[in-house]
Image (cartoon, rainbow, N blue to C red):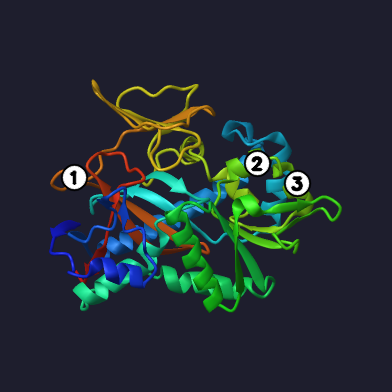
Amino acid sequence: MQRLERQARADWRQRLEAVGMNFHTIDGAVYWDESACYRFSRSQIDVLDDATAELHRLCLQAVEQVIRRDWFERLRIPRWAAPYLTASWERGDPSLFGRFDLAWDGSGPPKLLEYNADTPTALPEAAVVQWFWLTDCFPQADQFNSIHEKLIAFWQGYRHSHAEVYFAGVADSDEDAGNVAYLMDTALQAGIRPHWLAIEDIGWQAAAQQFVDLQDRPIRSLFKLYPWEWLLREEFGPYLPKANPSLLEPAWKQILSNKGILPILWELFEGHPNLLPASFADKPMLGDFVRKPLYSREGANIEIRRGSSVVESAGLYGDDGYIYQRYTPLPEFAGNYPVIGSWVVAGQPAGIGIREDKTEITGNNSRFVPHFFVED
């Protein structure tokens, strides 16, 4: 794994905007950063592919164990929601995607930092934008990236039971809007009729016991880029089991969508080479560790303790408690710390996107850097 510095394309902004990525600059700083890229070998990509498939397998086993052993309270899942998500799991409700964040320098086993199982972003840049960059800059090379094709394949299967799907997100977030718009396009290419709806515009029709859009049309299938823990705390949260629309991500993903799954994975599969030791707050960790809120977004409220050194990030999370994870160093390239986001689409490894920062905490403004691979 190498980090290569290079000259950005002269018209890179226009090229990104031409494929729908308008959030290439955040708060005046570059978010999409093609002044560098990461180079892998094919055998290294095979390692990432295998690790991603293995972590997905472990996570599905963990869901089964949480349900069977009634561990919902450990994950701060409301008791009233447990039968709802259990029914979702037992029905086999489909999952569209997820993203494992990995620490890896190209040697040894990749280590799971966390699983963005519910509302992963950085999707269009991983699926489309870096692919067009590859064809411009390294046309003879390849890329670990079948995300676009696998998304369309998922929707092609999904349309047999859902001819139209509502896509909901937070209206005033450019990044969220870009991710949702891209997913709507993949659904359209698969023959589904997509409808955009701001999450705050979803209505409840009490007489019919159903969710509706602004024209009072029933919402039977909904993709929501909105966290499950927020949904359950909304006023209409308890109505979800009554209306029971088809949701992406499905209700059972609540089990995987908070960092409490990390100590559960370690408890179930202690010593697994792709996992780091982790514990809940009732079992504080000795030595170097990272403290993470059960629920948080974009690297907020993370604390890294390494010897006498403490690195913290600000935020508004932590009221639901914390978990502890053994500290593992991120690879460092000239003061840049990359995290590999490895995508799963419809249960299959689908590709990677890399975010890097000047610190070991990956946050909302951490840069996206493209990658390619070559034969060994």
Amino acid at pointer 3: Tyr
User: Is 162 rendered above or below residue 109?
Assistant: below
Please tell me how crowded label 1 is: few (under 14), some (14-19), or many (20+) other residues with Cα within 10 Å.
some
Q: Percent x, y for residue 112?
A: 38, 45
| Nearest to N terminus: mark 1 or mark 3 | 3
* Mark pair 2, 3: CA separation: 9 Å
Please name the amino acid that badge 1 sits on: Glu
Circle 3 is placed at which residue position? 239
Q: Mark yes or no: residue 143 visible.
A: no
Q: Horizontal placement of 176 versus 80: left or right?
A: left
Q: Closer to the N terminus: mark 2 or mark 1?
A: 2
Q: Is residue 81 above or below residue 195?
A: above
Mark 1 vs mark 3, foreground winner is 3
Circle 3: element type: helix
The quarter in which the C terminus is drawn is bottom left
Q: Residues within 10 Å of mark 3 (few under 14, many from 20)?
A: some
Question: According to the image, label 1 marks what residue?
Answer: 332
Residue 335 position within the rendered picture, expressed as x and y whole percent measured from the top left = 16, 43
Q: Nearer the viewer, residue 77 or 131?
A: 131
Residue 271 in sight here:
yes
Determine whether, in the image, residue 268 is placed left or right of residue 13: right
Closer to the observer: label 2 or label 1?
A: 2
Query: Which residue is labeled 2 in the image?
Result: 232
The percent coordinates of residue 313 (x first, y second) are 34, 32
From the viewer's perspective, tell me whether residue 308 is left or right of residue 149.
left
Q: Are marks 1 and 3 in contact (CB under 8 Å)?
A: no
Task: Give the amino acid type for the residue marked by disc 2 in the picture.
Answer: Leu
